[in-house]
Image (cartoon, helix red, strand yellow):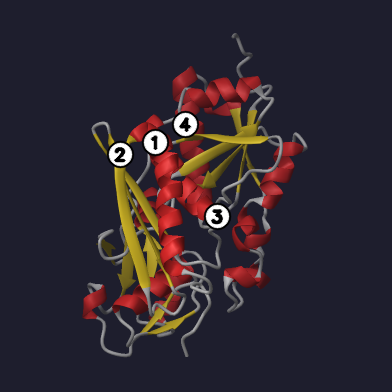
Amino acid sequence: MTVTLPSPASPLKIGTRGSPLALAQAHETRDRLAAAFELPQEAFEIVVIKTTGDNRQMIDADRPLKEIGGKGLFTKEIEEAMLSGGIDIAVHSMKDMPVEQPGGLVLDCYLPREDVRDAFVSLSAGRLADLEEGAVVGTSSLRRRAQLLNHRPDLKVVEFRGNVQTRLKKLEDGVAAATFLAMAGLNRLKAAEVPRSAIAPEEMLPAVAQGAIGIERRGDDARAAAMLEAIHDPETGERLAAERAFLAELDGSCETPIGGLAELDGGTLRLRGEILRPDGSERLADELSGAIADGAEMGRALAAGLKARAGEGFFDFIGG
């Protein structure tokens, strides 16, 4: 099917949040589309949309994200703009995306995945194991909090949010001795100045879809569908199909500490998953391997097995 490509006079509008990382991801999407169709950058318009999650009053308050609105904090206004025709496509960090899209929207384009690992960031310690007993660690992620306390129950965890610069300033001010960021984000920002060490998935399993960029469109937009197909990375799509099926079966949200990672080796997909009590007192983990085409089915089966082992009330906070 022939589609009319965008032009400087009629650009394709790319919706994004306004953070430095979100803009870097939108620019990568624009550049890949421009290269694929030999178009000038002026054939695309980056449209910054402020989401509820970008509200400074709310996001800088020492409140967990689950109390403010969960993953939808970072997507609702962008998706509304797309449904109303204000933008043509939207660029998202996939680990922020709910497992279901609003009616009329499709999410089936993924860029090549970046480093999936978490980064340990500290001005005084090189690795997590180097932290002194009782040290304070800052994170807003329930997953990271639970994983950290499972490994090091002696540590104290405090709520910790903000962009890279804000978090580094908090470390300088002594609010915490260490924090965590995603290696993917630091790489995309080319933030070489941030002192960090990558944490192996065997030590801290990443969030589902960490390191992946997804591009959402309207289901009836043939032009966007054809253009996005040209930059879609099938391997990332195969991995995320398994991981997001795992998350969906667990009803994953910002209120549940869940880690998941799918990796490909030839024609085989290996899926690892874990769930933790919010206080880190218990961790349940398992993995499955099988054909890539069976990834989503494996994700659901892995989740069902962990749920059966966990029983009712597993995600209730029982610590002191």
The reply to whether callout 1 and callout 4 are in contact (CB within 8 Å) is: no
Numbered disc 1: secondary structure: helix
Numbered disc 4: secondary structure: helix
Amino acid type, label 2: Gly
Q: CA distance from mark 2 to mark 4?
A: 35 Å
* Label disc, if present, on residue 158 of the rendered structure: none
Amino acid type, label 3: Ser
Q: Which residue position is annotated with label 4?
A: 31
Q: Quadrant of residue 236?
A: top left
Numbered disc 2: secondary structure: strand
**Mark 4 surroundings within 10 Å by alpha-carbon count, few (fewer than 14), some (14 through 19), many (20 or more):** some
Q: Which residue position is annotated with label 2?
A: 290
Name the quadrant of the N terminus: top right
Q: Residue at x 41, y 57 (%)?
A: 305
**Number of numbered markers:** 4
The reply to whether callout 1 and callout 2 are in contact (CB within 8 Å) is: yes
Q: Please state the horizontal and vertical placement of residue 235, each as a whole percent of the image.
A: 36, 34
Q: Quadrant of residue 137?
A: bottom left
Q: Residue at x 27, y 89 (%)?
A: 133
